[in-house]
Amino acid sequence: MKIIGLLLLVIGIIGIVLTVMMPALFGYGGLIAGVTAILTGIVFLAACAVRTSCGCERRNNNNCGC
């Protein structure tokens, strides 16, 4: 989940930067999509931070961390 959250943050930032640089090509809907991707990435990272194991303990029966 941590990797997915980080990827969403990166994709959101790239989407916002490209939308600001080339609004005629992408339209301003890219800002909404970028903000949505960033917020979703934050939710994924927060879910991983709240659950210290991130599902690792359940799969491997040990405390291997995230």
Image (cartoon, rainbow, N blue to C red):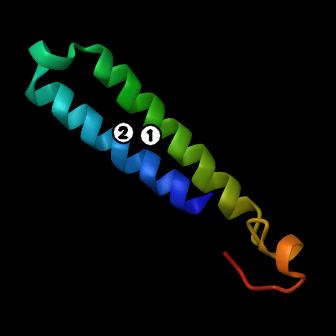
Is mark 2 in CB contact (under 8 Å) with mark 1? yes
Q: Which mark is residue 38?
A: 1
Q: Secondary structure at mark 2?
A: helix
Q: Is residue 35 left or right of residue 53?
A: left
Q: Is residue 45 left or right of residue 12?
A: right
**Gap between marks 2 and 1 measured at Cα:** 5 Å
Residue lying at the far front of the rendered structure: 59
At label 1, the amino acid type is Ile
Q: Which residue is mark 2?
A: 12
Residue 54, image x, y percentages = 73, 66
Q: Is residue 28 above or below residue 46?
A: above
Query: Residue visible at 31% across and 15% down?
Result: 29
Q: Is residue 57 above or below residue 25?
A: below
Query: Residue visible at 86% across and 86% down?
Result: 62
At label 2, the amino acid type is Gly
- The answer to which of marks 2 and 1 sits earlier in the sequence is 2
Query: Residue visible at 88% across and 71% down?
Result: 58
The 10 Å Cα crowd at callout 2, few under 14, some 14 to 19, many 20 or more, is many
Q: Is residue 36 left or right of residue 54?
A: left
